[in-house]
Image: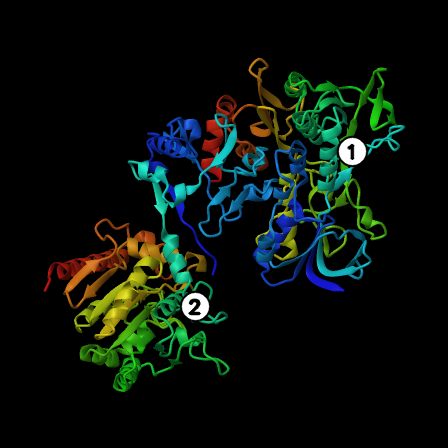
Amino acid sequence: MSQSTYLIIGSSHAGLSALKAIRIEDTEGSITLVTQEDTLPYSPTILPYVISGQVDPEQIFLRDGDDLDRYRVIFRKGARVVAVDSDNHAVALSSGETLKYEKMLLATGAEPTLPPIPGLKEASCHVLRTLGDALRLQSAAQEAKSAIILGAGLIGMHAAENLAKAGVQITIVEALPRVLPGYFDERAAGLVQRAFTEHDIKILTGSTVTHMAASNNACTVSLDSGVELSGDLLLVATGVKPRMDYLAGSGIDAGDGIVVDDTMRTSSRDIWAAGDVAEARNFFGGKKRVDATIPNAVEQGRIAGMDMAGDPTASPFAGGLPVNTYRFFENHSFSVGMSVVPDSEEGVEVDLIFQPTSMQYQKLVFEGDRLVGVSGINTGLDPGIMWQLIQRRIGLGKMKRRLAAFPLDTGRILMCRMWR
Amino acid sequence: MGKSYQTIAFYPEKCDGCNRCIEACAEFHSGEANPAHSRIKLAEDTENGSFAVSLCRQCGEPRCVMDCPAGALKKDMDTGVVRWDESKCVSCQLCTLACPYGGITYNPVIDQVMKCDFCDGDPVCVKACPRGALELKTGSDIYNGWGDLEDLFVPGVSACLGCNSELLIRHTLRRIGPNTVVATPPGCIPGVGAVGFNGVTATKTPVFHPLLTNTAAMLAGIRRYYNRIGRDVTMLAFAGDGGTADVGFQSLSGAAERGEQMIFICVDNEGYMNTGVQRSSTTPYGAWTSTTPVGAVLRGKTRDSKYMPLIMVMHNCEYVATASMTFMEDYYAKLEKAIEAAKRGMAYIHVFSPCPTGWRFPPSKLIEVGRKAVETNMVPLWEFDYQTGELSFDYPVDNPLPLEEYLSLVGKFRHLDKNQIEHLKETAALRIEILKGIAKTKK
């Protein structure tokens, strides 16, 4: 039976961030890093680029063996946790082995959800979360001429673009009225959608699938509009949910995700959770939420690691908010905070640049003299500085108008005044 | 020991926005002066006419590296530079979101992100700046050099929080090395456990505990013995101001005059801190100590301090210097000279040694107190070389800060009235004049 001071379950962004934070404070304590994957650590975000062939699947790893040796960590590949026994400080692996720990981090990420569509279970559909998924999809794409993608979130959109680059004819079906609804309002989403259409990718928004049927390596999808689509392959990218099936019977509090406090500690004393699996403070107040993004995973992992190792400089989690960058074709975009609120929303002030012909979009959302949301397409702003202005809740005073007029330079000036 | 790295410092007050740094950076990285290619960016703050700079800080714990899903960013542990690997980058731009400083930016001309790569160690922006607003800080090279030397003082000694002596001993022993016999008479240094505790010593060199009166005499005898048997061993004293200028003076004076080969370091914390903060002959005028109290009649010490380093110059020591741990590079340079001089005769270093406990200031202010003492001319940094007969200043003394900037940091001076401060100013000014006079006279 293996025993370690720190046990980290999951080796993607949250797990690696915690590993680093622990080692900064505790250079001696033993650390075991466990992943159900059979490879070195990687990020699910890289997978669409594997499908298009832009990156070599051998080159996607976040850390190599030397890096892990430097952290003096025991790295266990292919180890899937199936049960947690918090009373005895132990977890069970699918192999039957038991791992004991003093302190544990659950950073098991998320897994795809399949919507309850009649016929979906029988149809052989793809999902995209693991390297195995990506390699299966890549090899299927080589045979396929056409594909149907359910869901126009980041995974669906990235996959669509990369499959199109691999020469597959794509149709995206989205139940909501626009693409990327978590990050962009209807105007920005419209620009994204237009770029896809210009690249011969069909997007059907506001469409629900009523049922589907599989036949001879192809699948037929029936929509509520009566339209029938058929494709050589089907990718379901309608959403993810935290992977926490192993919690059954552990007594650890879970809602949408594993519920954590501001130090990422779960309801069980010596267990922390971070990343896509954790349900944590919402930056804007209200109900705790799962924020399945890389920046959030890194931040939560860092806080968890510091707290686990007793780092006296640890500070509490400020709360999660939507943050992301998104590149599509020759365009770049980003979104931070409350950027999808309607212009007419009570209590906020929206400053907008919308130039559809030149494919430019910039939206700054203020609440009083504070920035609370920003999104942009082809703006050339510093997304990180904009995020800090929101995260630090900086009162802009008379700089507010300058920020709206010259966001790039004013952001940099504020950065130099406030936190350089 | 952890490594330290070179950095590019920006002084906004010197920048006039001429953009030469931007042109040089763009030219170096792309072959054309188009500012889109520059990794360094300036923004004019029109409110006060100053410039803000966006540039990669080569962070110690870079968020861009942690957030990159492609493993395309990595901190180079040898140079400290955060490296971007074009072959792995998928242009997702999450790094531009991770960086709070605008240090990694999207370049639309090449449709890729770009960041400062330190130009292979010799940044062109720094060389291009005509006003010195950008400076390559190489202090880390020296730090790393010292860091590689063995620390010959054990961890866990019982010095007070913020103790200057511990800093002094660690650095001195690093440089002087293990082929040394250390003498440390009664005072704080043996008090914290340097000479032994429960049968072990705190130094990884031979160390002994002479009487307060006879440190220099004992070291002289040991050195002469080693000379007789043909071994070159360094003699080193860490003595307080009591063990140097008061009780230890007779034996030191004799050894200095005879030209005994040793490095004698006076750790001047301006009083008997170890026994309860009593006055010594180096306690400054006006300072509170437990024997120069502040009350209705007495207002601290009534006599000026004895200026010991000049007295040692008059002993014809091979080398005499004043030093402060705040100015570490200067101290290391002086140790080099002391090591050489001690092969010929006595090298005497008088280290100004602020004491948070006895002087009443927060431990976190130790370095600042040291800096202000030097910048106000309270503690001028100089050295004297007997071979050339030359006295030289190691820190400019002609435009000192007002003395109040130093006095106000230290609790033992808090009660001083105008006349007392005036007196201290006159004393400091007179010392500078005397030193300047000697500096003008050469052999």
Q: Is residue A176 above or below residue B24?
A: above
| Residue A325 quadrant | top right
Q: Which residue is mark 2?
A: B151
Residue at image position (38%, 76%) is B187
Callouts 2 and 1 on one subunit: no
- The figure's colour scheme reads rainbow
* Disc 1 crowd, CA 10 A, few/some/many (<14, 14-19, 20+): some
Residue A50: which quarter of the image?
Answer: top right
User: Is residue B407 something one can see in this rendering?
Assistant: no
- Secondary structure under tag 1 reads loop
Where, by quadrant of the figure, is residue B373 drawn? bottom left
Q: How many marks?
A: 2
Identity, as a three-letter code, of the amino acid under mark 1: His
Vertical side of B159 occupied by A104: above or below: above
In front of the other: label 2 or label 1? Answer: 1
Residue at mark 1: A126
The residue lying at 63 percent from left, 24 percent from top is A348
A88 sits left or right of B145 in the view: right
Chain letter for the residue marked with disc 1 in the picture: A
Is B28 on the left-hand or right-hand side of A308? Answer: left
Q: Marks 1 and 2: in contact by CB < 8 Å?
A: no
